[in-house]
Amino acid sequence: MKHQDWKKLLVPIDSTVQDLIRILNETGLRIVLVVDQNSALIGSVSDGDIRRGLLRGITVGSPTSEVVNFTPLFVKKGTSLEATKEIMVLNKIYQIPIIDEKKRIVGIHLLDEITFPASYDNKIVIMAGGRGSRLMPITSTIPKSMLQVAGKPILELIIQRAKSQGFTQFILAVHYLSNLIENYFGNGSSLGVSIEYLKEDLPLGTAGALSLLKPYPDRPLIVTNGDVLTDINYGEFLEFHTKNKAIGTMAVNIHEWQNPFGAIVTNGFEITGIVEKPIIRNLVNAGVYVLDPSALLLLEENVHTDMTTLFDKLRAKALMTTAYVLHEKWIDIGTHAQLKYATENYRLNEQTNLRD
């Protein structure tokens, strides 16, 4: 983000969480700055503040005050870059506002512009072996992950987005009509990336194919289903996993369903309340994960294992598993209706963003 665009991050205290999410998605940064009518700093809201809020039950319509940090870090105008960098590194923050003597925001520093290049050695495994039976007859001659959206195969869109964020090493787990995938992508050189293949003799599930990795990776591994399109930032996802010292992290999406009937609350035979058409809110598996290499030791080679089973095994051993709540756009393409929705609502631009 260019420094002259910092004003896009400013919001009044009477904004909603939906406003904050829109700004985060539009700017690509991970912070929103809450100001008064004179642009004086009141507080900040980070991407993590919103995810934690969503976990504890706030909604997109909740007020900004539900998630704001009223004691944000800042630097004064004229503070040296070296001193600013030290403050940011010590506090493990990636953006910090610059204020004048009246606490008005006059700019913002971004740590990655000062220090770190956007490049990752972590590999991304894409599960692309599924048959896509719910999408028959379309998938009778083409793998589900090769279905086209915005003029390109779903797999290519996933790879392009990850590449734009600094990831260049991919492993495709293939089975059904695998030759079509291998012939299209080859070693990945045409896309400017490196692609290897895990070939399943039999379908091994969303985690089982990882047992075929030889050798196991020496750093956390990102795994994504090959039928998921999302605006997730894989680098931030990876950072969340590492920061929380997790063995397994699962991206989760908020799913809300409104009961069409009034819900009756009882205590024995006594009616104690009536909730008219309540909204039921759940966190659902979004099909994107980060796994520590040690998690792979719980897999048996060539044994069918779903990712949810692997997470159950991790929890049974009291190993840390965490949920990364998505507020980014997300489409799971598993049915004809979902494919139609993706075709109509996905646009391809330089960030490969999903359209509102």
Image (cartoon, rainbow, N blue to C red):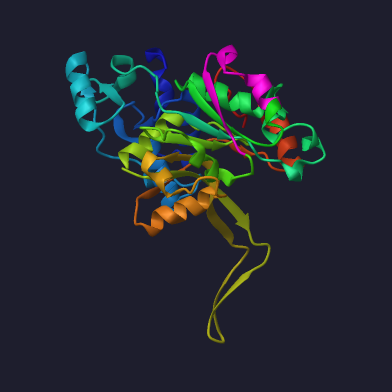
Q: Position of residue 87 (x, y in %)?
A: 19, 25
Q: Nearer the viewer, residue 67 or 144?
A: 144
Q: Is residue 183 magenta?
A: yes
Q: Is residue 139 magenta?
A: no
123 up-or-down from 261: above or below: above
Q: Position of residue 125 (x, y in %)?
A: 51, 33
x 28%, y 30%: residue = 93
x 24%, y 26%: residue = 103
Q: Quadrant of residue 142?
A: top right
Q: Nearer the viewer, residue 29 or 156?
A: 156
Q: Quadrant of residue 88?
A: top left
Q: Quadrant of the N terminus?
A: top left
Q: Position of residue 220 (x, y in %)?
A: 39, 35
Q: Residue furthest right?
A: 137
| Residue 151 seen in this snapshot | yes
Q: Quadrant of residue 8?
A: top left
Left or right of 315? Residue 300 is right
Q: Position of residue 3 (x, y in %)?
A: 37, 14
| Residue 79 seen in this snapshot | no
268 up-or-down from 257: above or below: below
Q: Quadrant of the C terminus?
A: top right
x 58%, y 23%: residue = 352
Per the rendered image, the range of residues in magenta is 180-200
